C-alpha cells in the first residue's frame, strides 16, 4: 500500500508503531488538548486517548507487516542481481527486525506465511511458465530462497500450493510439472534427515499424481537438460568459464559425477568437431581445446580419445575415397606411396596423433570394404551373378590396397582393426560359394580363401560351402570315371589319379568324400538290385567299391537293402 511505502521511507523504529507507544502518546495528547480546565475532564479525555491507542494495535501490526514487505521488495528490486547473497540476506533480516517480524517470533512466522511466501510463489510461478529449462531460472530461485531465509515448512507449503495450481489448469502442463518436481527435489535436497526431503517431495508427487519411479526419471531429465545448457555456455564461451562454476552447477542440479563426466566428454567432442570442421586444426583451436579440457576436467587420455572420435571421421572419409579409387581401377598400384604421404599430411593437419590416425585410416578402408560387401549382397538378391563376381574382384583389390597402405603408414606396432567384416553368414557363404565355383572352373581366378578370411567365415561354414559346391562335382566325377572304365576306356588306376587331383582342389572333409562315394556306389547297385548277380556284375561292383575306397563293411547296409529279399527267397 502507499501507506506502507511511505512508512518504509521514514526513519521509524518498530516500537514507534506499537500499542505501548500509541496508548500513552494519545492519552497525553488528549490531556494536553482537552478543552475543559478541570482535572476530571482532562483525565477522561486522556483515558479516551489511551483506548484509541490500544484499539489501533491491529492496524499497527498490519501496517508494520506491509511496510516490512515493501522494504523487502525494494531490496529485491534494487539489490537482488548485484549484491552478494549473504549481504542481501543480512539486509532483509535487519528489515524484518526493524519492523518486529524477525524469524524467531510468531509475527515473523505470520510475515513469512503471508508476504514472503507470496513473493516466492510469484517468482516460482514465473519460472514454471517459461517453456525451456534454463539454469539461470534455477539459480535465481535458489538465490531467492536463500536471501528470504524462510522456514522449510513454509517453502514446502508454497510448492504444494503451486502444484495444486498446475493441477487446476488441466492439460498441457507437463513441462511445468517436470520443472516443479525438479525444483522441489532440489529445494528439499539439503533437509536433514534425508527422509524429510523425501516426505516433502512425496506430497508434491501425490498432488500431481506422479509415481515415485516416474518422478525420478522426469527430475533426471530436467537436470540433464539444465546441465546441457551449462555445457553449451562452455562451448560458446570456453575462455570465460571456470571449472568450479561447472562443478557447482553439477552439484546444484543433483547430477552424479559419472553422469556429468559423460556429458563433459560429449561436450568436448562437440567442441573438437566444430574446430576441425574445415579439415584443419589451427593453433588457436589447439589452445581452445586445451582450455576446454581443463574446464571440463578431462584427463589427457580421455581428451585424446574424444578428439580422435571427433577428428577421426574426417581422416576416415579421406582414406575411404582413396581406396575407392583403387577399387574402381582409377589408380595404379605405384601411386600408393603418394597416397600414403597425402594421408599422413591430412592427419597432421587434423592434429591427430599417429596411432589414432592409423586406426582412423584402417576404419576408412573397412568402410570401403563394407560398402562393397553390401553392394554384393544386393546383387545376390537380384541374382545377378556376373555383377557379384565383378564386385568381389573389387573387394579383393580394395583389401590388397588397404593392407599395402597400412603397411606403409606409421607407426609400427599400432593395433588396427583386421581387414575383415562381421558379415551376415548366409550372404557370406553365398559369396564364398561363387568364388569357389569360379576358382574350380578357372585356375587363374582368385583363391576363395581370401573371401573366407575377409568375411570371417568359420571352418564349419567353409566346409559346408565346399560340400554344397564340390559334393555334386565329386559324385559326377566318380560316376563319369566308372562309366568310362565300364565302356572300355582307361583303367580305374588312371581314373584314380584324376579323382585324387580333384579331391586336392575340392578340399572336402573326409566325411563328405565318404558320403559321395556311398551315393555313387548306391547308384551302381540300383540297376542290378533284387536279383542274383552275374559274375561280371559282381566283379564290376567290387572294382567300383575299391575305386571309391570303400570297405565291405561300408557297403554292407546297401547290399542288404539291395539283395536281402533275393537271399531270403533263395533260402526258402
Image (tube, helix red, strand yellow):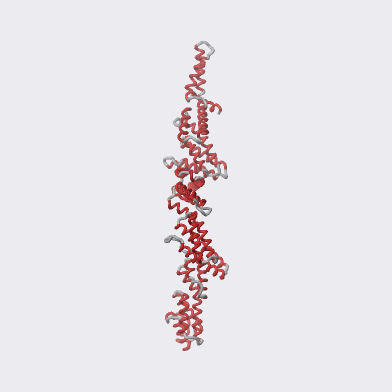
Which residue corresponds to the image point at 48% horizontal and 39% vertical from the top-left? 142
Which residue corresponds to the image point at 48% horizontal and 25% vertical from the top-left? 13
Q: Nearer the viewer, residue 233 or 72?
A: 233
Residue 284 is at least partly visible in this image: yes
Instruction: In the rendered view, tell whether residue 99 sits above or below residue 30.
Output: below
Quarter that holds the N terminus: top right
Q: Nearer the viewer, residue 188 or 254?
A: 254
Q: How many marks?
A: 0
From the top left corner, tell me how far across and down residue 263 is, in percent: 48, 49
From the top left corner, tell me how far across and down residue 363 is, in percent: 49, 60
Residue 568 is at least partly visible in this image: no
Instruction: In the rendered view, tell whether residue 481 sits above or below residue 395.
Output: below
From the top left corner, tell me how far across and down residue 566 is, in percent: 47, 85
Q: Nearer the viewer, residue 229 or 70?
A: 229
Which residue corresponds to the image point at 48% horizontal and 45% vertical from the top-left? 239
Instruction: In the rendered view, tell whether residue 467 sits above or below residue 546.
Output: above
From the top left corner, tell me how far across and down residue 422 is, in percent: 48, 63
- In the figure, residue 459 lies in which quadrant? bottom left
- Residue furthest to the top in view is 37
Amino acid at each position: 500500500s502507499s501507506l506502507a511505502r511511505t512508512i518504509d521511507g521514514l526513519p521509524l523504529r518498530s516500537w514507534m508503531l506499537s500499542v505501548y507507544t500509541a496508548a500513552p502518546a494519545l492519552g497525553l495528547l488528549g490531556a494536553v488538548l482537552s478543552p475543559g480546565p478541570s482535572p476530571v475532564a482532562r483525565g477522561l479525555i486522556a483515558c479516551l486517548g489511551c483506548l484509541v491507542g490500544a484499539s489501533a494495535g491491529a492496524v499497527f501490526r498490519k501496517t508494520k507487516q506491509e511496510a516490512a514487505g515493501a522494504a523487502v521488495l525494494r531490496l529485491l528490486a534494487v539489490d537482488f542481481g548485484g549484491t552478494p547473497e549473504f549481504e542481501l540476506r543480512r539486509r532483509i533480516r535487519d528489515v524484518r527486525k526493524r519492523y518486529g517480524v524477525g524469524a524467531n517470533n510468531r509475527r515473523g512466522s505470520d510475515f513469512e506465511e503471508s508476504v514472503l511466501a507470496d513473493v516466492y510463489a510469484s517468482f516460482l510461478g514465473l519460472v514454471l511458465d517459461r517453456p525451456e529449462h534454463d539454469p539461470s531460472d534455477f539459480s535465481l530461485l535458489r538465490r531467492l530462497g536463500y536471501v528470504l531465509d524462510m522456514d522449510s515448512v513454509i517453502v514446502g507449503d508454497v510448492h504444494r500450493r503451486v502444484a495444486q495450481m498446475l493441477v487446476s489448469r488441466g492439460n498441457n502442463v507437463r513441462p511445468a510439472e517436470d520443472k516443479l518436481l525438479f525444483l522441489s527435489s532440489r529445494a528439499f535436497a539439503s533437509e536433514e534427515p534425508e527422509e524429510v526431503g523425501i516426505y516433502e517431495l512425496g506430497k508434491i508427487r501425490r498432488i500431481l499424481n506422479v509415481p515415485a519411479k516416474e518422478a525420478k526419471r522426469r527430475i533426471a531429465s530436467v537436470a540433464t537438460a539444465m546441465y546441457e545448457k551449462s555445457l553449451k555456455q562452455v562451448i560458446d564461451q570456453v575462455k570465460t568459464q571456470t571449472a568450479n562454476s561447472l562443478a557447482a552447477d553439477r552439484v546444484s542440479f543433483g547430477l552424479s559425477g559419472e553422469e556429468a563426466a559423460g556429458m563433459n566428454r560429449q561436450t568436448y567432442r562437440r567442441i573438437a568437431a566444430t574446430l576441425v570442421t574445415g579439415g584443419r586444426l589451427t593453433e588457436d583451436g589447439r589452445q581452445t581445446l586445451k582450455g576446454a579440457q581443463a574446464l571440463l576436467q578431462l584427463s589427457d587420455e580421455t581428451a585424446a580419445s574424444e578428439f580422435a572420435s571427433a577428428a577421426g571421421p574426417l581422416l576416415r572419409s579421406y582414406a575411404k575415397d582413396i581406396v575407392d579409387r583403387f577399387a574402381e581401377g582409377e589408380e595404379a598400384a605405384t601411386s600408393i606411396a603418394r597416397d600414403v604421404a597425402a594421408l599422413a599430411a591430412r592427419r597432421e593437419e587434423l592434429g591427430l596423433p599417429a596411432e589414432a590416425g592409423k586406426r582412423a585410416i584402417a576404419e576408412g578402408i573397412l568402410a570401403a570394404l563394407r560398402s562393397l560387401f553390401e553392394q554384393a549382397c544386393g546383387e545376390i538378391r537380384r541374382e545377378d551373378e556376373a555383377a557379384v563376381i565383378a564386385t568381389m574382384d573389387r573387394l579383393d583389390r580394395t583389401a590388397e590396397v588397404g593392407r599395402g597402405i597400412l603397411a606403409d603408414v606409421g607407426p609400427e606396432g599400432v593395433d588396427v582393426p583386421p581387414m575383415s567384416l562381421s558379415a551376415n553368414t548366409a550372404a557370406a557363404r553365398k559369396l564364398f560359394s561363387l568364388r569357389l565355383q569360379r576358382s574350380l572352373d578357372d585356375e587363374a581366378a582368385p583363391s576363395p580363401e581370401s573371401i573366407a578370411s575377409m568375411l570371417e567365415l568359420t571352418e564349419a561354414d567353409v566346409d559346408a560351402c565346399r560340400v554344397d559346391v564340390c559334393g555334386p562335382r565329386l559324385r559326377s566325377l566318380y560316376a563319369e570315371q566308372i562309366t568310362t572304365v565300364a565302356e572300355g576306356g582307361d583303367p580305374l588306376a588312371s581314373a584314380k589319379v584324376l579323382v585324387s587331383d580333384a579331391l586336392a582342389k575340392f578340399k572336402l572333409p573326409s566325411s563328405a568324400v565318404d558320403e559321395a562315394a556311398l551315393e555313387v556306389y548306391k547308384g551302381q547297385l540300383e540297376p542290378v538290385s533284387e536279383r542274383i548277380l552275374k559274375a561280371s556284375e559282381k566283379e564290376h561292383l567290387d572294382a567300383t567299391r575299391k575305386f571309391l575306397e570303400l570297405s565291405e563293411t561300408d557297403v554292407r547296409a546297401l547290399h542288404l537293402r539291395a539283395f536281402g529279399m533275393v537271399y531270403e527267397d533263395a533260402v526258402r
